[in-house]
Image: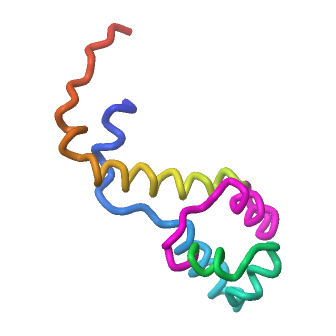
Amino acid sequence: MMADTWQVMTRKPTHPGEMLREEFMDELGISVAQLANMLGVSRQTVNELVHERRGLSPDMAIRLGKLFGMSPQSWMNLQRNIDLWESLSLNREAIDRIEPLAMAL
């Protein structure tokens, strides 16, 4: 089942920065500077994340989870999905050449 999972990724997953920007900052009227202050990080860090020029670190997932009352894992899952999508996009030809092993269960 897991071997087929990567093949069904038909659209790019939501970047954690997009989720942060659209579902939290826009909805709550929070600026980059305000969010950076609440999280105890630099404005540059938040700005790069919300503009999808930076990935989400485990530290940031913990901070966002605490601030918004969510699990850090939910934030990290968004990043994991983006990482898998980008890796597949970059290495598609090589990955397609891999023949799965026939495993007896």
Give the percent coordinates (x, y) of residue 10.
29, 56
Q: Pinpoint residue 37: horizontal percent, then vertical percent.
A: 81, 81
Q: Quadrant of residue 98?
A: top left
Q: Which residues are magenta?
A: 50-71
Quarter that holds the C terminus:
top left
Q: Horizontal and vertical percent for residue 62?
A: 75, 57
Q: Is residue 52 magenta?
A: yes
Q: Nearer the viewer, residue 33 or 26?
A: 33
Judge from the rendering whether residue 71 lies leftward or rightward of residue 81; answer left or right. Answer: right
> Which residue sits at x=74%, y=61%?
70
Asked whether 86 falls inside the magenta stretch, the response is no
Question: Looking at the image, which is closer to me, 70 or 61?
Answer: 61
The one nearer the camera, 100 or 1, is 100
The residue located at (37%, 55%) in the rendering is: 86
Q: Quadrant of residue 26?
A: bottom right
**Residue 70 to residue 103: above or below:** below
- Counting the numbered discs, the total is 0
Quarter of the view holding residue 40? bottom right
Q: Position of residue 19 (x, y in %)?
A: 56, 72
The quadrant the N terminus occupies is top left
Q: What sort of colour scheme is used for the picture?
A: rainbow
Whether residue 40 sits left or right of residue 95 in the image: it is right
Q: Residue at x 20, y 25 (%)?
A: 99
